[in-house]
Image (spheres, rainbow, N blue to C red):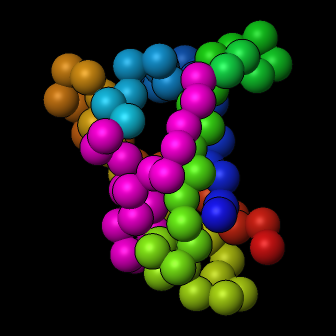
Amino acid sequence: MIEVVMPSGPTFDASVVDVASLRFGPGHAKPAYNSLTDENGARALIAAFRLPESKVAPGALNACVTGFQNDGIPFEGCDLVKH
């Protein structure tokens, strides 16, 4: 499993993510599980994906998550992968 943390910020509200729309990596893996939590005083969505389904290559430097907010607005976020 690989966990992806999506913190809320000035332009992103983790509490309005349509979790069913989340996809991760070149394999477009669906989340195995997720939780909404408070991280440093702000909401954060944590979603876990099965690494084989994500098709993120061993040694990959970065990976992306895509999805939609509940109102249909798409988003994408990419960051470094911690192996």
Residue 27 in magenta? yes
Residue 16 in magenta? no
Quarter of the figure that contains the N terminus: bottom right
Quick check: 25 above or below 8?
below
Using residue 28 as the reference point, say whether residue 53 is left or right of it: right
- Residue found farthest to the bottom: 58
Image quadrant assignment for residue 29? bottom left
Image quadrant assignment for residue 30? bottom left
**Residue 6 % position (x, y):** 58, 37
Question: Can residue 65 be seen here?
Answer: no
Q: Which residues are magenta?
A: 20-36
Picture residue at 55% right of the left edge, 18% below the top: 10
Foreground: 75 or 26? 26
Q: How many marks?
A: 0
Using residue 5 as the reference point, say whether residue 70 is left or right of it: left
**Residue 40 % position (x, y):** 81, 19
Picture residue at 54% right of the left edge, 37% below the top: 34
Using residue 71 as the reference point, say whether residue 1 is left or right of it: right
Quarter of the figure that contains the C terminus: bottom right
Quick check: 1 above or below 68?
below
Foreground: 41 or 37? 37
**Residue 5 % position (x, y):** 64, 42
